Amino acid sequence: MAELTYLDAGKAALAEEMRRDSTVWALGEDLGRGGVFGQYRGMIDEFGPDRIADTPISEATIMGAAVGAALVGTRPVVEMRFSDFALCAVDELVNQAAKNRYMFGGQGRVPMVVRQPMGMWRSSAAQHSQSLENWYVHVPGLVVIAPSTPDDNYGLLKAAIRCDDPVVYLEHKDLWPAADEVSVGAEPHEIGKARLARAGSDLTIVTWSKMTQVCVVAAEKLSANGIDAEIVDLRSLWPWDKEMVLESAGRTGRVLVVHEAVQVGGFGAEIAATVAEEIGIPVRRLGGPRIPVAYSPPLEDMFRIGADDIVDAIEKMNA
């Protein structure tokens, strides 16, 4: 075990996979300089410019090159800098990478990872703050992962790199400095398996990414009011761990789904509908309002979901 930040855990995972497998390489803008957040810092010194490859400022070019490279036998890790920028390459990802195995009867595979730093971070405004995970969950052929802890960023990135299908890998920008124990050298985590972030008996909170940490704070506040909340951190959004969610929901009798993404059309609706259809218990959603994220900190806070918002939503469920 070693204490690493969320950022350094991801860097360690990528470096280990590149040492293990010579077909793994990374490409994107300014990776040789360390990447926009420093998540590739120093890697070019070990692996050189052929495996830590700087590209033109063209997301479509980056993604298209990665799709082709994956089809001929390598395992590219695509860096999109911000999840918002990946929208410039959505055809290459959604119409080419996601559909290739199906359309060609399994003759081709696209084993690539698309790293998309997501979410709200330091007044980054409307074009650099989005959480668009529901878009990718909707697309058949894509695996979607959103880790919330340093250990998960380590174990799940290793799993994503070894996956034979295209993976949209969403790392929350606000989690980069978060530090915790990481099982360095351990085997990859299992894709599609949720993590029980907190055991409880009175209701189930289903969440992922940064909201997991916020929900833990909310649960401690609820505990002081005599409400014992269980927290299921999905980690993997597709496939998602329906078995764990339904088991927890059936035991506690109520569910709140929390995500930072806009609530309208969010992935929380799929989870809520599944719970309602499968076991028919009370279920609610809490997500962001359908507005652009502002640059101004006070306006940004109107979009941000905090622990008190979660506590308020749960207390209303109890009323």
Image (cartoon, helix red, strand yellow):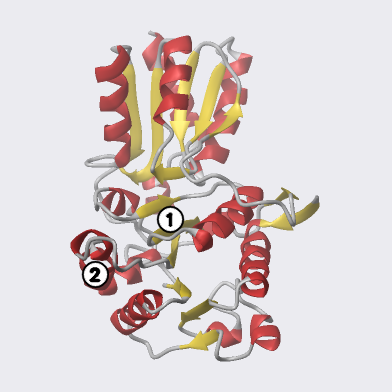
Q: Amino acid at mark 1?
A: Gly
Q: Is residue 222 above or below residue 185?
A: above
- 228 vs 265, left or right, is right
Looking at the picture, how far across and down is residue 187, in whole percent?
A: 66, 51
Structural distance between the alpha carbons of marks 2 and 1: 26 Å
Looking at the picture, how far across and down is residue 17, in whole percent?
A: 62, 68
Q: Who is closer to the viewer here, 86 or 304?
A: 86
Q: Who is closer to the viewer here, 1 or 303?
A: 1
Instruction: Give the residue displayed 35% in from the left and 46% down from the top.
Output: 261
Disc 2 versus disc 1: nearer the observer: 2
Looking at the picture, how far across and down is residue 225, in whole percent?
A: 58, 12
Image quarter of residue 269:
top left
**Quadrant (top left, top right, bottom left, bottom right) of the C terminus:** top left
Mark number, residue 119: 1
Mark number, residue 271: none
Image quarter of residue 8:
bottom right
Looking at the picture, how far across and down is residue 153, in whole percent?
A: 59, 54
Instruction: Give the residue displayed 66% in from the left and 70% down from the top.
Output: 20
Say what secondary structure mark 1 lies in. Answer: loop
Q: Residues within 10 Å of mark 1 (few under 14, many from 20)?
A: many
Q: Residues within 10 Å of mark 2 (few under 14, many from 20)?
A: some
Instruction: Give the residue displayed 38% in from the left and 79% down from the top.
Output: 72
- 103 vs 299, left or right, is left
Q: Is residue 177 above or below residue 16?
A: above
Mark number, residue 96: 2
Judge whether residue 183 can be spotted in this image. yes
Q: Is residue 309 above or below residue 278?
A: below
Say what secondary structure mark 2 lies in. Answer: helix
